[in-house]
Amino acid sequence: MHTQLLDTEKRNPLSYRIDSKSTREILTIINNEDQKVPFAVETAIPQITTIVEDVVASFNNNGRLFYIGAGTSGRLGVLDASECPPTYGVSPSMVQGIIAGGKEALTTSVEWAEDDGQAGIESLKTVNFSKNDVLIGITASGGAAFVIEALKYARSIGAKVGAISCNKDSSVFTIIDEDHRVFIPVGPEIITGSTRMKSGTAQKLVLNMITTTAMIRIGKVFNNLMVDLRPVNGKLILRAQRLIQEITGCDEQTSVELFRQSKGNTKLAITMGLFNADKEEAEEMLEKAKGSISRVLEQKDSPVR
C-alpha cells in the first residue's frame, strides 16, 4: 500500500498556508477539524459493539484484553490499560498495552520498531497470550508490521482479534473480519501525516469506549458510579466514603464504619449498607450476582437508588 494513497497522509486543504496564520486562526482551524472526530467515531459503533462483546465474554472467562500498537497508537493503548486498575479496581494484568520498542518507546521515539513483525509475535508469547484473550491492533495508517504479524499470530491460535485504523484500505483490515474492523474516517490531518492529532484523538475515544463499556457490563459500575475504584490515597478514600453515603443513604459516620468493616472494598461496603448485611453475607450476594450490585438488587427485588 502506497503512503500517498492513505487518507492520513494526504494534505488537508483546510490548513493550506496555516504557517501564515495568526495564533488564534491556527487554533480555530485545529479546533474545527477536531470537532469532526466524534462523528467519525460514531460511524464505527457497530464494529466497536462487536469487539466489546468479545471483550466481555473474554473477561467472564478469565481472559484478558491486549492493545498493540506503535508510536502514538501504542502509547494510547498503554495509557488506557494503565488507567483501568485505579478506576475499576481490576488487576493490572486484565487490560494490557503493548508498544513496539517496549518501555523505551513510551517516552522516546523508536520509529524503526514498528517494522519488526517478529517482535510483535514475540511480545505476545512473552505475556503468554492465549485463545481466551482478545487482541486489538491500533494503527493510524494500518501498515505497521509489528501490529499485523501479532494479529495474525493471535488469530492463528484461535483468539478474537480486532483493529482500529483511520484508513479504509488499511493493510491491517485485510486480516480482520469485517465486523471487527473499526474504521474511523477522520480524513487528512491539519499537519500532513501528523497522526497524533485527529487520528490519535479518535483512537483515544474508541479505547475509552471499549474499556468503559466492558467494565460496565461486568459489574464494575453501579448506576453511573465507579463503585469498584481502588481507594489508594486520601482523595479516593473520601470519594469512596461519599459513594457509600450517596448510594445507601447513610450518614458520614456510618459510611466510614462500613468502609472500615469492608477493609476498603467500596462495592462491598455499599452492598453491606444497602442490605444491612455483614461482610460475609455481602460477599456471598456479590459472588452470586457476578460482582454486580444491580444484579443483587434485581435478585432481592429492591429499588435502585
Image (cartoon, rainbow, N blue to C red):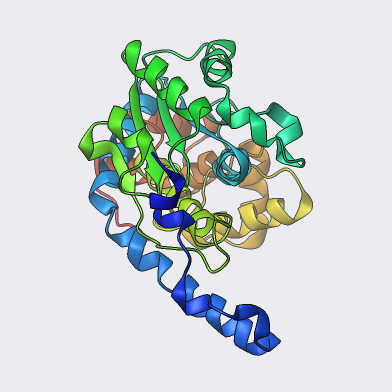
Give x and y (percent) for residue 133: 41, 21
Give x and y (percent) for residue 18: 61, 79
Residue at 47 percent of width and 78 percent of height: 14
| Quadrant housing the C terminus | bottom left
Q: Is residue 17 left or right of residue 60?
A: right
> Can the viewer see residue 17 in this picture?
yes
Q: Is residue 41 left or right of residue 278?
A: left
Give x and y (percent) for residue 248: 48, 56
> Can the viewer see residue 289 in this picture?
no
Looking at the image, residue 28 lies above or below residue 10 = below
Query: 242 or 98: nearer the eye?
Result: 98
Q: Quadrant of residue 42?
A: bottom left
Residue at 55 percent of width and 40 percent of height: 77
Residue at 36 percent of width and 14 percent of height: 131
Residue at 54 percent of width and 81 percent of height: 29
Query: 171 or 119: nearer the eye?
Result: 171
